[in-house]
Amino acid sequence: MWRVGLVFGAVAWFVSLAGLVEALHARWVVDGVFSAGQALLVLLLAASGWVGARRSGATLAARLGAGTVAGATAGFCLGLLAWLGAHVNLRAMFINASPVLFELLLRGRPPESGWAANLLVGAALGLAGSLVGVAPAGLVRPLLAGLAGALGLGLFQDLVLLILQPEALTSVREWLFVAGGGPTVQGVLAAATASAAGAGLRPAVKTLAPGASLPPRAAQVVWSLVGVALLATLPVAGGPFVAQVLVIVGLYTLMGLGLNLEVGLAGLLDLGFVAFFAIGAYTVGLLTSTGEHGIAHWSFWAAVPVAVLVSLVAGVVLGIPVLGIRGDYLAIATLGFGEIVRLLVLSDALRPWLGGSQGVLAIPKPVVAGFELSGPQHLYYLTVVASAVVAYVAWRLQDSRLGRAWMAIREDEDVAEALGINLVSVKLLAYGLGAAFAGVGGAIFAVMVGSVFPHSFQLLISIQVLALIIVGGMGSIPGVLVGSAVLIGLPELLREFGEFRFLVYGAALVAMMLLRPEGLLPAAAQRRELHAEVEAEPQSAQLAAGTATEGR
């Protein structure tokens, strides 16, 4: 199991030398006692023990021993890094190899004995992780929930402080947080206890929750009303910053719902999806702008249908030349389309009409019954309504004859064509409808910012939308919402760690592919398919082994 420890030790080296540990060390989990950077290292050492225990023999002693060895190996790697930092100028190669990092790794001990201390700490944490791995699920779930609650209070303390700003909550704020510092001990214990209790009492809460004793249809209505009430109060409780983050999450949700039609249902990989988002934004900008590039001075409500139609036509135009392309070649072709749109907007030939790099300015805000939707708290409700409408349309399409045709194409185009499905029309509808959904998001983005610039539509946006679909679960509409919240909302709430966003994306995608390849909230068909494949692999291996034995 020392190999598992070496892997986690290498990961600990990477996050340390990349600067993530030091950046998190600036935020307290318990004020003056325990930082988020220390928590990251502790979690890595404990995780090494958990993985080591799961990969070892069947006996309890073997699993605990394997976890201890894995944790000790990972701890030794951290001690070795601290020793190297004391004797070698690592900062000449790694700018984040700072004295603060090595002081954190050594914890006040001299370098000569720091490696031994890290080895012992790693062994203890590895043993703890292996105990979690062998403990019953009913005990592990509340424990992990309590740890998540304690860490969450420290990481999202700015958000909690925003919610606790009213004068009536001053005593609660002072009880939870040190003035100008991090969470108090009692605040962390309260957050951990509440989270653990919520996880432990989850089955009982389900039976006692509103609508639990009602018929399924009535219970669905009750929960829908509860969800609507929660969505309506979020921007009021969180303030303008939280509302702004939720608007951005909503925009990515709109794009994710559109790309989910193409990738999740029809299996058509599109890496230039941001082009349709840009087309919707530019269409609304040109039709509503009061500046020099405005061509019609329409209202937002009159321009949105046109933006949706233009985006839909653009999706069909894209689909025509790539109808016969599949797989990786399709991804490269669509990637080229996205870059073509951005470069055309930047070109000197279209500058008189599209503004070039200076963009389209003076885009007015939407007006409803004489009331202007100016701030993020107002645009939040517009985004929620648009996302709900698009999600409903996507849900109806998914269960329709067209949606089943998309899924048939995703599984096997040749078989789908043999069954009588018109590949041309079905593919073009996938491209067009997906682009139309992205056009709605672009329209809201244009009025939110008040201007449209070509540099706002980089390739990274397409990659982020694809990533959130993978993390949420391909083909799943609720998965798009979860993926947007996890990959877009959380980094926005932790803006001080924004430079590590790509690191988080990569780690999340690798973890998803290994631990939950179907996504956080996958569609039922995707879950059955992947789990059937996982179950079939051991059976195939056993059959092959039996055949080889008979041959001998």
Image (cartoon, rainbow, N blue to C red):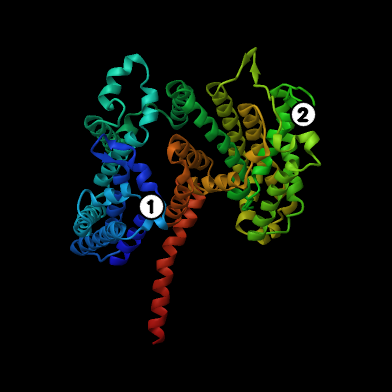
Give x and y (percent) for residue 534. 43, 61
**333 or 94: nearer the eye?**
94
Residue extending farthest to the bottom is 552
Q: Is residue 19 visible?
A: yes
Query: Where on the picture, by quarter, is residue 175?
Result: top left
- Residue at the location (74% across, 41% down)? 345
Classify 542 as above or below 549: above
Q: Label 2, label 1: how many angstroms apart (C-alpha)?
A: 47 Å
Sort mark 2 into few (<14), some (14-19) or many (20+) by Cα contacts within 10 Å: many
**528 or 358: nearer the eye?**
358
What residue would you read off at disc 2? 293
Identify residue type, mark 2.
Answer: His
Identify residue type, mark 1.
Answer: Val
**329 or 59: nearer the eye?**
329
Residue 142's label in the rendered image is none
Query: Where on the picture, by quarter, is residue 11?
Result: bottom left
Sort mark 1 into few (<14), some (14-19) or many (20+) by Cα contacts within 10 Å: some
Local secondary structure at mark 2: loop
Query: Where on the picture, by quarter, is residue 194?
Result: top left
Give x and y (percent) for residue 538. 40, 67
**239 or 509: nearer the eye?**
239
What residue would you read off at disc 1? 15
Nearer-N-terminus badge (2/1): 1
Which quarter of the image is occupied by the C terminus?
Answer: bottom left
Local secondary structure at mark 1: helix
Relative to 176, 441 lies left or right: right
Which quarter of the image is occupied by the N terminus?
Answer: bottom left
- Residue at the location (47% across, 52% down)? 506
> Count of labels shown?
2
Classify 441 as above or below 236: below
Q: Is residue 1 visible?
A: no
Give x and y (percent) for residue 514. 42, 57
